Image: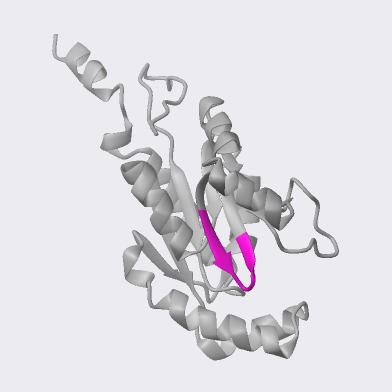
């Protein structure tokens, strides 16, 4: 899965970035993702499909594609997902077509997915994937954030905390790991990573021709 961007002012193209943000629930990745999308016009969001019920304030097609379980199973059978996982009694997956459409239109793609999804995506797209894991400053602070959010029962919060410990154990499978003890600083670090990855030599697919032209 390799797509090239429009030529830059120097006349050469680059490969698109599949930019993954992962974190335990409540560690801040959704906030950082929203800020990154607002700051980066060449970045588009991959919208996951899910079988969980829609929550107040959410919009179908913007926050998630909300589908019935039978529909989700059919999409799995038809190989319509880049990755999918079973989380908290519901299923989540990344539809292929919207991602391909964004890449074709010249956008890099941002993924808000867990470590399982990041691993599956990396197995498919390899070097086009950049994986960033965001840690909370402490597990106590993470629980406080979940409780202040007031969207889940205590039982669900306990389950999220147990899952958070499992997710954190996979930190070393990511390319970058950040601690979100200040959301603005963490956001700026994420944005710096994206900028650097866009400039990687391996992604500058037209660079060879440009250099050869300099050496004539």
State which quarter of the image contains the N terminus. top left
**Figure check: 12 above or below 198:** above
- Residue furthest out toward the left: 216
* Residue at position x 57%, y 30% in the image: 101
Whether residue 48 can be seen here = no
User: Is residue 87 in the magenta section?
Assistant: yes
Q: Where in the figure is residue 16, as x and y percent of width and height?
A: 43, 35
Total residue callouts: 0
Q: What secondary structure is the stretch in magenta mostly built from?
A: strand
Name the quadrant containing residue 203: top left
Residue 201 lies, in percent from the top left, at 27, 36
Picture quadrant of residue 55: bottom right
Q: Does residue 30 appear left or right of residue 124 in this picture?
A: right
Residue 165 percent coordinates (x, y): 47, 83
**What residue is shown at x 78% (from left), y 63% (from top)?**
53
From this view, report whether residue 108 is shown above or below residue 83: above
Q: Nearer the viewer, residue 12 or 75?
A: 75
Q: Residue furthest top?
A: 216
Front residue of 192/72: it is 72
- Seen in the image, is 166 located left or right of residue 28? left
Residue 215 in sight here: yes
Which of the two residues, 181 or 94, is positioned nearer the viewer here?
Answer: 94
Q: Is residue 147 above or below residue 90?
A: below
Tell me if residue 99 is in the magenta stretch: no
Q: Residue placed at 30% from the left, 21% from the top? A: 206
* Span of residues in magenta: 84-91
Which color scheme did the rendering employ for the protein?
one colour
> 136 above or below 205?
below
Quadrant of the rendering where the C terminus is positioned: top left
């Amino acid at each position: 899965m390799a797509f090239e961007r429009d030529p830059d002012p120097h006349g050469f193209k680059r490969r698109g970035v599949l930019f993954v943000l992962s974190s335990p629930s409540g560690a801040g990745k959704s906030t950082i993702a929203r800020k990154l999308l607002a700051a980066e016009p060449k970045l588009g969001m991959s919208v996951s499909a899910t079988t969980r019920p829609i929550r107040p304030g959410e919009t179908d097609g913007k926050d998630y594609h909300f589908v019935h379980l039978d529909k989700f199973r059919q999409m799995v059978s038809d190989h319509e997902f880049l990755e999918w996982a079973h989380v908290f009694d519901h299923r989540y997956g990344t539809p292929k077509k919207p991602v391909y459409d964004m890449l074709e239109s010249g956008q890099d793609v941002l993924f808000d997915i867990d470590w399982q999804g990041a691993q599956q995506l990396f197995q498919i797209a390899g070097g086009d994937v950049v994986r960033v894991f965001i840690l909370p400053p402490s597990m106590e602070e993470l629980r406080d954030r979940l409780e202040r959010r007031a969207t889940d029962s205590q039982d669900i919060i306990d389950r999220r905390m147990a899952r958070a410990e499992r997710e954190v154990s996979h930190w070393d499978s990511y390319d970058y790991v950040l601690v979100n003890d200040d959301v603005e600083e963490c956001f700026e670090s994420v944005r710096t990573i994206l900028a650097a990855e866009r400039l990687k030599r391996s992604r500058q697919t037209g660079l060879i021709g440009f250099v050869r032209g300099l050496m004539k």
